[in-house]
Image (cartoon, rainbow, N blue to C red):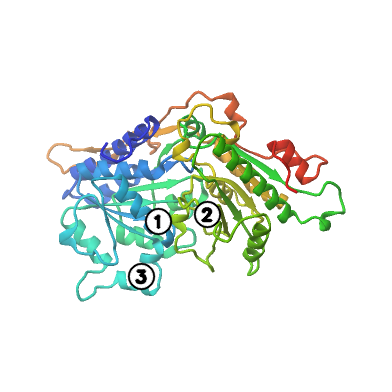
Amino acid sequence: MSGMTTPMLFQQEAIASAVKVLSSCLVDLEKIRGATGEQAGRELIVSNRGCLLFEAPTGTGKTLMAGNSVEELSLKYKIAWFWFAPFAGLIDQTSKAIQGEFRNLRVKDPSRDRYVESVKSGDVFVTTWQSVAVANTDSRKLRNDSETMLSIDMMIENLKAIGFHIGVVIDEAHHSFRGQTQAFAFYREVLTPDLTILATATPRDHDIDDFVKKNHIKHLNRISVSRERAVKAGLIKKGVKVAVFKSPQAGVENLINFKQTALKCGVATHNKLKQLLIEQGSSIVPLLLVQVEAGPKSTDTAVMWLRELGFSEEQVRVHTADEPDPHLIALATDERVEVLVFKMAVATGFDAPRAFTLVSMKTSRDPDFGTQIVGRIMRVERRLQGLADLPEALQHGYVFLSESESQAGLTTAAQRINAVKDELADISDNVAVVTIGDEDPTAQVTHKSGQTSMFVSPIDMDPELEHQGVSIPPQASQTPEQQVLADFALVPPP
């Protein structure tokens, strides 16, 4: 593999499986090129072998696995790729990751690089669905010819005419198409890709099922990585400890500021972890994530409380849709910043492995959102990977929920994460290209089920790890501070 980072064994297995399945799709497409009934055969082959899903927890290297697969396929076949980031704010992060990791992939900007004659196999056009499939000014520019460039629609058509396969990578696929009918139309009618790679941390998501159904995909080839496998590889933390606050007795709810209490406990945990890292001789400064409710005053209030708890102006940053921080991606490594206050904007795609602690003042029952937000604190910082005798406290993430209703989404998310087992996609045996006598090659279904065969390679489950997913500690007749003291063995805040 030619990437800058050498994939771990489980990642290598996943990449090899992906390349094998998708290569078989391209090989059979070449067999029927120019034959009578080519279009019908193409649809049958692509719908069974051309769509693949990487399903793995945040932090397990989905981008690394997808990128290596894209690179290997591009070295063997003539492919132009379109890589869809979930948000415009993540285009730069995605582009840098591709440029930094893969020697044989070249990032292209579809807003200014639409020249067919300059496209080479392994070119990756990084964009968002909003940029190409929504009726806004930018989309109209891309979808129409200019004086110097073809429209993106015509560029794709011309690339196909000169022998290019079209490949698509859909990052954070759990919500990429949510409510976007124009995106579905662009995918089906303009891209009509031969290969599609989906990546998600949200297991068995209903939006993935919707994507499969609406695009007439007969079989979605799944490559799944379990949480246990990633924990054993040292890429993600063992689990998350969650504290949920409620009043010690009925009738006093209005006398307790649960949001402020949750923040105090989160700060106490953050400071304890910071001290543990210093004692380990590590230069890592942990990052505290603070999620606030929607509302004009919520961020101001949180920042005020944080200042009262001892943080300086330089140590606290705010990033919301209304107050976007233009340097959000840089915050991941800027260790002068210890706290990031947000609403929804960093729940997906924000990569900050030094984040250990999350305080959420938002009520959310959505398990998909629970999976994503907890994923922000599950990664193991590279400087800690592979270290022996790491204190147990540094092998977990910590979540403080000021609203007890919030635990429903996290509990469901935990069950879904823990349910994922290792799985590799095998080449389907239900579609074959056959030639009878002097007739043109045709693609045919070879058995009634119409399902691609799979082989499952479950790893030995560590009984201890079985109990270390996202867990909700039992409620007792304790004050919030006493509960945190019992569960996290931390000094309660003043």
Where is residue 233? Give x, y as percent: 45, 31
Q: Nearer the viewer, residue 310 or 466?
A: 310
Can residue 174 be seen in the rendering of this structure?
Answer: yes
Badge 3 amino acid? Ser
Crowd around label 2: few <14 · some 14–19 · many ≥20 (10 Å): many
Badge 2 amino acid? Val
Q: CA distance from mark 2 to mark 1?
A: 26 Å
Report the residue at 46% width, 49% height from top.
Answer: 351
Mark 2, secondary structure of its residue:
loop
Q: Which residue is mark 1?
A: 85
Badge 1 amino acid? Ala
Q: Nearer the viewer, residue 51 or 433?
A: 51
| Label 3 vs label 1, nearer the camera | 1
Can residue 408 be seen in the rendering of this structure?
Answer: no
Q: Which residue is mark 2?
A: 337
Mark 1, secondary structure of its residue:
loop
Mark 3 or 1 closer to N-term? 1
Where is residue 491? Give x, y as percent: 71, 40
Query: Looking at the image, do the residues carrying marks 2 and 3 touch, with CB atoms under 8 Å apart?
Result: no
Q: Is residue 57 above or below residue 135?
A: above
